[in-house]
Image (cartoon, rainbow, N blue to C red):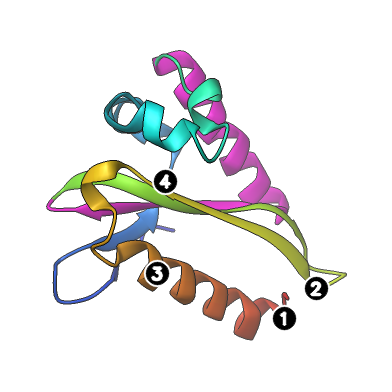
Amino acid sequence: MMYVISLGEDGAELRPLEPWRAEELLAHMERGRDFIGQYIALPDFVTDVESSRSYLQSYADKAAADTGRIYGIWADGTLVGGVLFRTMDVGLGVAEAGCWLEPSAVGKGPQAHSSKGTQSHHTRTRRLL
């Protein structure tokens, strides 16, 4: 299901990050690899288009199995970050959430809005903690 959620007046948007966006994810990692890599291991997994597509496919598979999700944050049409549920167990009502931004988006608010929005949605509709 394709959707777009506005993250505020600055035009930032939250959208599903799907395998067909592998090249966008790779370009995003190239722009923010060193910065993002200080905090999470994602840049280690996304090193070329094939690994980017494989990483996104793993989340498409998790979404289909209802065990994880990944969303991208776009600003002015460019992927600048993301929010994910690395693991989800709907039966137990728990999930592990993560987020990241490239340097150009830090301090502009999209991460806070997207994290709050996805967590709020999943807490209300999926009963996850």
Q: Disc 2 marks which residue? A: 93
Between marks 3 and 1 in the image, the one whose residue lies nearer the viewer: 3
Q: Position of residue 127 (x, y in %)?
A: 72, 81
CA separation, marks 1 and 4? 23 Å
Majority secondary structure in the magenta region: helix
Q: Which residue sits at x=87%, y=70%?
A: 92
Residue 17 — which label? 4
Circle 3: element type? helix
Residue 112 — which label? 3
Q: Earlier in the sequence, mark 1 or mark 4?
A: 4
**Marks 1 and 2 in Cβ contact (< 8 Å):** yes
- The quarter in which the C terminus is drawn is bottom right
Circle 4: element type? loop
**Marks 2 and 4 in Cβ contact (< 8 Å):** no
- Neighbours of disc 2 within 10 Å: few (<14), some (14-19), many (20+): few
* Three-letter code, disc 2: Gly
Q: Position of residue 100 (x, y in %)?
A: 44, 48
The image quadrant of residue 60 is: top right
Does residue 56 belong to the magenta stretch?
yes
Magenta-colored span: 49-76
Residue 127 — which label? 1
Circle 2: element type? loop
- Determine whether 82 is above or below 91 in the image: above
**Marks 3 and 1 in Cβ contact (< 8 Å):** no
Q: Position of residue 42 (x, y in %)?
A: 53, 32
Q: Is residue 71 visible?
A: no
Front-most of residues 62 and 26: 26
* Three-letter code, disc 1: Arg
- Neighbours of disc 1 within 10 Å: few (<14), some (14-19), many (20+): some
